[in-house]
């Protein structure tokens, strides 16, 4: 595939990251601190939202695998869903349009988050499911994953660094409109760089059996638990960061931009390094080392009393973050390859659907953890200066709690079996099964 097509496909990460990260970072803050909904009510909404995901994500993945069109199984859904996704994102940030200055009711929170998640899953699941089929070798997967994450970091920078600049000057609805439009545009255009084989076979079993086959796969279970835990850490950090800047550092919201800049710049540089390390060490070993580095760096958030110290901490976190971002989809693609070898079917939709469900659950768990910590430590949104107990709670949300979860992720990853000779054997057998020419000098990893 031509390099420009790989880049165009990868650019869809701008939209997928922009929407997801903005929601992860600011949804809780917007509805609790800005719209004055009670933390317990928002936490309840996030729990109900997770129940919706329990149906939405696997079902859409199952439908995608069974789809048959002359354009393929995935591309039609990306094209059809991109614009509605942008509109749904906008609606999340405009409760004032319907309720004025009043507190939004729970039903509105549920309606807009459910609608957003439906279209986000429809589009991003199918866009992501193209990745394993389009790029079968470790070298290509590491290369394209690095580009995807680079574009994803652009979306991350816009979501986390640009959002405070926009909502503080133009308001939350303007942020929703701009980000929703960019999400729709980048994901819609990314299919111009995509390809898929319409003859590829998907599911031959029912939905319940398809889910069962997925969740009992040992390789997937260990990967999914690792991914859930490490992305729960991301969700906690992103959701706690606005509180950390406002109440611990006692800075204006625009200071978030400086923190994001340090994180993004170091992560971009580390992607270039981790791309080579993934091939040299193998995906599993590289992921283990990146998680360990990431967890160690989180401790630095305990100490800063100034913007400069916080920027240094976020930059250190970026060293490990680059490897984690690059390797998640590489590890899952290897799981899908192993499943294809066993079943003879390409089930990217189901695997990415169940994985998406797991990732959405971390938003709910994040809400429960954050709500419990803030409530227990005496946080009060009406206070400009929080009590010492609340400051301690916010520090715990940035350090001790995410470090413990990251170490649990590292333990879960130790059970992931696709490494070394076993991974090499899977790759070779799949090449023979699918009639692919073996690359010149593959490194399956260790």
Image (spheres, rainbow, N blue to C red):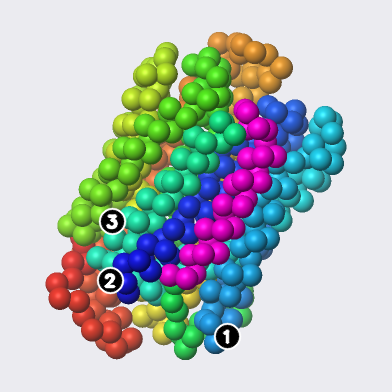
Determine if residue 235 is in view. no
* Residue 355 to residue 339: above or below: above
Q: Residue 284 carries which label?
A: 3
Q: What secondary structure prevails in the magenta region? A: helix
Crowding around mark 2 (Cα neighbors within 10 Å: few <14, some 14 to 19, many 20+) is: many
Q: Distance between the residues labelled 2 and 1?
A: 26 Å
Residue 88 in magenta stretch: no
- Residues drawn in magenta: 167-193
**Residue 272 screen position, x and y as percent:** 25, 49
Q: Earlier in the sequence, mark 3 or mark 2?
A: 2
Q: How far apart are marks 3 and 1 (CA)?
A: 36 Å
Q: In which quarter of the image is residue 174?
A: top right
* Whether label 2 touches label 1, CB < 8 Å: no
- The residue beneath circle 2 is 137
Mark 2 or 1, closer to the camera: 1
Crowding around mark 3 (Cα neighbors within 10 Å: few <14, some 14 to 19, many 20+) is: many
Residue 173 in magenta stretch: yes
């Amino acid at each position: 595939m031509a390099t420009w097509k790989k880049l165009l496909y990868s650019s869809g990460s701008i939209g997928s990251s922009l929407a997801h990260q903005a929601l992860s970072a600011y949804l809780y803050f917007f509805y609790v601190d800005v719209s004055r909904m009670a933390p317990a009510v928002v936490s309840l909404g996030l729990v109900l939202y997770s129940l919706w995901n329990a149906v939405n994500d696997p079902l859409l993945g199952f439908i995608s695998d069974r789809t048959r069109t002359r354009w393929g199984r995935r591309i039609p859904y990306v094209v059809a869903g991109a614009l509605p996704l942008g509109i749904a994102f906008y609606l999340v940030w405009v409760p004032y349009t319907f309720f004025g200055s009043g507190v939004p009711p729970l039903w509105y929170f549920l309606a807009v988050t459910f609608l957003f998640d439906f279209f986000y899953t429809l589009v991003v699941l199918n866009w992501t499911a193209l990745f394993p089929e389009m790029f079968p070798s470790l070298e290509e997967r590491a290369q394209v994953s690095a580009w995807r994450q680079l574009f994803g970091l652009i979306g991350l920078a816009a979501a986390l660094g640009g959002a405070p600049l926009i909502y503080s000057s133009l308001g939350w609805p303007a942020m929703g409109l701009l980000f929703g439009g960019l999400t729709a545009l980048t994901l819609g255009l990314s299919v111009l760089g995509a390809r898929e084989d319409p003859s590829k076979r998907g599911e031959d079993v029912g939905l319940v059996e398809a889910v069962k086959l997925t969740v009992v796969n040992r390789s997937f279970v260990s990967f999914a638990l690792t991914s859930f835990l490490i992305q729960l850490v991301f969700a906690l950090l992103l959701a706690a960061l606005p509180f950390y800047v406002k109440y611990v550092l006692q800075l204006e919201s625009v200071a978030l931009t400086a923190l994001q800049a340090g994180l993004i710049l170091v992560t971009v540089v580390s992607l270039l390094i981790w791309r080579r390390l993934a091939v040299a060490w193998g995906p599993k070993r590289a992921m283990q080392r990146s998680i360990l580095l990431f967890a160690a760096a989180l401790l630095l958030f305990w100490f800063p009393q100034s913007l400069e110290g916080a920027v240094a901490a976020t930059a250190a976190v970026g060293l490990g973050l680059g490897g984690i971002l690059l390797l998640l989809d590489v590890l899952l693609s290897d799981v899908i390859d192993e499943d294809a070898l066993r079943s003879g079917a390409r089930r990217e939709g189901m695997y990415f659907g169940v994985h998406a469900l797991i990732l959405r659950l971390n938003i709910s768990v994040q809400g429960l953890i954050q709500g419990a910590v803030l409530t227990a430590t005496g946080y009060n949104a009406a206070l400009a200066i929080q009590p010492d107990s609340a400051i301690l709670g916010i520090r715990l949300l940035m350090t001790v709690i995410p470090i413990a979860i990251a170490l649990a992720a590292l333990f879960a990853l130790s059970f992931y079996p696709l490494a070394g000779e076993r991974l090499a054997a899977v790759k070779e057998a799949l090449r023979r099964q699918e009639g692919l020419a073996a690359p010149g000098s593959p490194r399956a990893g260790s």
